[in-house]
Amino acid sequence: MRFGLPIESEEVFVQQPAVRRIKVEHLHNDDANYFTRSNEHEEYSEVQKGDENRKSQIADFESNNKSSAFETESLLQALEASFKVAQSTQDNTIERIIEHERKVREAEELRRKQEELRRKQEEERRQQEEKKRKEEEERRRELARQEELKREEELKKKKEEARLKEKKEQEEKLRKQKLADEEAKRKSGNTNWASVAKEVEKWRAEIVNIKEKVVAPINQNKESKKALNTLKRRVNVKFGQLSNSVRSCQTVCNEILEVIESTRSDTQAYQWILNFISKALISQAEAEVTVKPTAALPLALLTNVFLKRYPEFKYFLTARFVKKCCFILGYSCSIDTEEGRKRMGWKRSDDKWEDEVKYEERVGGIMTLWAAICRESHGSGSEDFDQGAEWRAVARILNTDSSVITNVHFVILSNWWEVSAQSFYQTYKKQAIKLFHVIEKGLAGEGKRKSFPAATRLQLLVEECWRGKFNTIKSMEA
């Protein structure tokens, strides 16, 4: 037998107590009449018996009813007791279930917390390992980068050492060649024109070398070319800001120096920018100095700063000067041939040589700039850009065969005179006076006889000198 509360879906059947139904007939008033009318005593007795029987039945019914009620009460009490027992048992069971469920929940919560703690610890451990892994990777990358930088630095150092060695060997070779040429000149007492021509050809070859080894590699690298073109525009802007003020020129010079310094870490870019500045100086001389000779002075100021600061600059500058104006070496040759005109710096466009006057103005502007650089060199140590170089160039021009002398020779000497004659005289004194006499009586006199227009100008400049007046261009302002 199962005790306890039924479940919701379970049907419960409870036995109802037996109830006897007894028909009781009540007496009516008509019964008296019945007995009155009846004359037989037996019938009356029978009626009484029936009445007694009915009373007895009623008593039995009441007795049975009390017995049924007692049984029902007992059953209910038994059911109540059973219910209480079942309820108590069920309550205990529920309490046990609740307690069990509580313990299960607590165990589950403990397990969840332990699992969460384990996951957290695992995640922290994983993060620590990942951090260590990344740090180790970063350390390895940094070591690799440092090694790469070290290798690059060593390679760069080796290249620089090789370059310096090659440069030193080249300079030593040139020095020996120069000494040999000077010795040959000393012995012969005349200009060694073969040596001069060889020097011109050497610098023309260097222009080809610059195009192949300096310009071409940059042109093939789009990123480098783009970056250097940006620097190129900056330099052009600064050239346009030059004025006759020394202070203003110093500001511009410092800004251009910043541009050059930004390329020092990259040899290719460094050489490219030096070559570009050399070309830009010549272009400024061709365009601006031709019209305004005083414009040569701020350009000369910048050039001497570059020559002192960057020894490599002299190589590019000399090559550019010799290509456009070989008169700075005192070289001249016949222009009867196409090759001769090329050597003397003539330009050719659309299968036509430029106009002679245009050529003279352009080359004269370049000579003015060169003379200004030499005048302001102040012992810069650049042998092709000092007063010694001026003496060499003027002396060679004076020794030039008259058959190759043209009007341009008088133009360049006149331009040189207006820039450097006075400082030249202050340096060489009596020797300078001797040179001036040769210019006046020798070259200028011969030029006037041949009706070269610029010869008259040159002679007038020398005559003014004898009267104590040097027609020198105005110096820069402070």
Image (cartoon, helix red, strand yellow):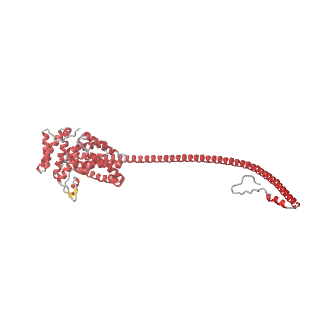
As rendered, which of 138 and 469 lies closer to the eye?
A: 138
Q: Nearer the viewer, residue 219 or 210?
A: 219
Could you tell whether 105 is left or right of 22 in the image? left
Is 231 on the left-hand or right-hand side of 11? left
Residue 203 visible in the displayed image: yes
* Residue 447, position as x, y percentages in the image: 13, 49
Q: What percent of the width, then of the height, locates residue 471? A: 16, 41
In this orientation, which residue lies closer to the viewer: 35 or 164? 35
Going by the picture, which residue comes out furthest to the right? Answer: 42
Question: If the image is split into quadrants, where does the N terminus sit?
Answer: bottom right
- Disc tally is 0
Rendering coords of residue 315 (x, y %): 29, 47
User: The C terminus is located in which quarter?
Assistant: top left
The residue under the point 24% across, 51% down is: 324
Residue 28, visible in the rendered structure = no
Can you give x and y, in whole percent of width and height, for residue 310 in the image?
31, 44
**Horizontal side, residue 269 vs residue 370: left or right:** right
